[in-house]
Image (spheres, rainbow, N blue to C red):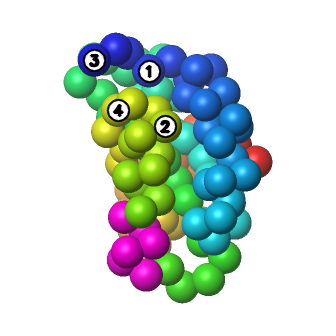
């Protein structure tokens, strides 16, 4: 495994954004260790997603697996509703939107 760098992750997501949009997303952002340039070989890529409508479990998992295939590493895919109060503000501050 290799360390995922912020610019590389953003570039991969931008290249694949048209396909990613087909999963019914409104917005996509990265946050966490990759954004802060603190990622290690064991780090996953934290991605914040907003769907255009209520999402099914299958569509959520399909998007997660697609993103993992694109990036070649584990992805922690979260929605706004999944964020707990203490970290919600931090995520909002450091999120870099792809679209």
Front residue (pair 65, 29): 65
The secondary element bearing badge 1 is classed as loop
The x and y percentages for residue 22 are 65, 64
Does 34 sit above or below residue 19? above
- Residue pointed to by mark 3: 1
- Residue pointed to by mark 2: 70
Left or right? Give the position of 81 relative to 1: right
- Residue pointed to by mark 1: 4
Of circles 1 and 2, the one toward us is 2
Mark 3 crowdedness (10 Å alpha carbons): few <14, some 14-19, many ≥20? few
The secondary element bearing badge 3 is classed as loop
**Marking on residue 73:** 4
Of circles 2 and 4, the one toward us is 2
Of circles 1 and 3, the one toward us is 3
Span colored in magenta: 56-61
Does 25 sit above or below residue 75? below
């Amino acid at each position: 495994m290799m360390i995922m760098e912020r610019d590389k992750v953003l570039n991969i997501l931008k290249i694949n954004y048209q396909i990613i949009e087909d999963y019914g997303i409104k917005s996509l952002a990265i946050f966490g260790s990759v954004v802060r340039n603190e990622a290690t070989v064991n780090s996953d890529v934290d991605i914040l997603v907003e769907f255009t409508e209520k999402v099914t479990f299958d569509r959520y998992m399909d998007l997660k697996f697609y993103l993992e295939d694109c990036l070649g590493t584990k992805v922690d895919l979260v929605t706004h509703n999944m964020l707990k109060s203490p970290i919600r503000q931090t995520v909002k501050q450091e999120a870099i939107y792809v679209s």
